[in-house]
Amino acid sequence: MRLLIPFLLPLTFASPLFSRADKGVYFLLAGDSTTAPKGGWGDGFLATTVASGSSGHNYGHSGATTASFRAGGDWGKVVKDIGTYKSSYDVYVTIQFGHNDQKTNSGVTIDMFKTNLKKFADEATAAGATPVLLTPLTRRNFQNGKVIENLADQRAATLSVAQTNNIKYIDLNLASETYVNALGKTEASKYNLASDDWTHLNEWGGVVFARIVSDLLVEKFPEFASAVKPNATMSALIKAGKPA
Ligand SMILES: *[C@@H]1O[C@H](CO)[C@@H](O)[C@H](O)[C@H]1NC(C)=O
């Protein structure tokens, strides 16, 4: 019997019991309308950039601030899903806010914005997921041929929370603004949800800006490589600042 053991061991390690390292990623997307279905990048992300074996859910909520996302119950659903999916997947929660928090009547100061982001990240971690903070997707309003940087404070606040607390992050604001500046107003307008809506994305815009999110994640965190379906053509166009 002893002699058999060396032959059985390799089989044991190849069995499903030992497949934890191959778990797919479950992406829970928390954010406002720029993540949400019909206007954001979230659905395009789940539909076109997530590889088979990985999955996710778009919890982006139109009009949401870091306060209303919690008060309205969306955050509770994210935390519940972490519990549901963490045994079968490595769960990641993307957290992207700022567009509504910044409005003067939002009731959310920049300090509260930072506190709320940190609390989301802490709770996601405590529930068994890995949080990733995203600086807010740029708006595409132009002035004198350049994108107006009207989310700079929210970008800086998000970066500060991430860096101070050692939370994973990607700088979507910078990457999306760089791309939109390279395209210019006329090409950028082709991603508008309505002709005069320079914030929300049409369906193809959702696919293209989701690719920016996906590329940023893979470049910075190699663990995403097997969870992502590449589109080298689109990634190259984006990098070159050309319409995708
Ligand atoms: C990949 O990107 C190109 C360029 O944007 C696009 O035309 C094509 O439809 C994309 N392919 C898939 C499978 O999404």
Image: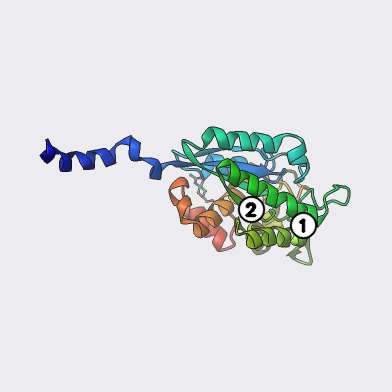
Question: Residue visible at 55% across and 63% down?
Answer: 240
Mark 2 residue type: Leu
Instruction: Pick whichever, 39 or 8, lies toward us.
Output: 8
Left or right: residue 18 compared with residue 79: left
Crowdedness of circle 2 by 10 Å Cα count: few (<14), some, many (20+)? Answer: many
The quarter in which the N terminus is drawn is: top left
**The residue positioned farthest toward the right in the image shown:** 105
Up the image or down, 19 lies above or below 146; here it is above
Question: Residue visible at 72% across and 62% down?
Answer: 156
- In primary-sequence order, the first of circles 1 and 2 is 2
- Secondary structure, mark 1, is loop
> Horizontal and vertical percent for residue 62?
74, 40
> Horizontal and vertical percent for residue 109?
83, 54
Crowdedness of circle 1 by 10 Å Cα count: few (<14), some, many (20+)? Answer: some
Disc nearest the viewer among 1 and 2:
2
| Coloration of the structure image | rainbow
Residue picked out by circle 1: 141
> Horizontal and vertical percent for residue 65?
77, 45
Question: Residue visible at 33% across and 35% down?
Answer: 16
Answer yes or no: is residue 43 visible.
yes
Quarter of the image where one finds residue 76: top right
Answer yes or no: is residue 97 visible.
no
Instruction: Pick whichever, 161 or 241, lies toward us.
Output: 161
Left or right: residue 225 compared with residue 198: left
Left or right: residue 88 compared with residue 92: left
- Secondary structure, mark 2, is strand
Mark 1 residue type: Asn
Residue picked out by circle 2: 133
User: CA separation, marks 1 and 2?
Assistant: 24 Å
Q: How many marks?
A: 2
Question: Residue visible at 79% across and 48% down?
Answer: 100
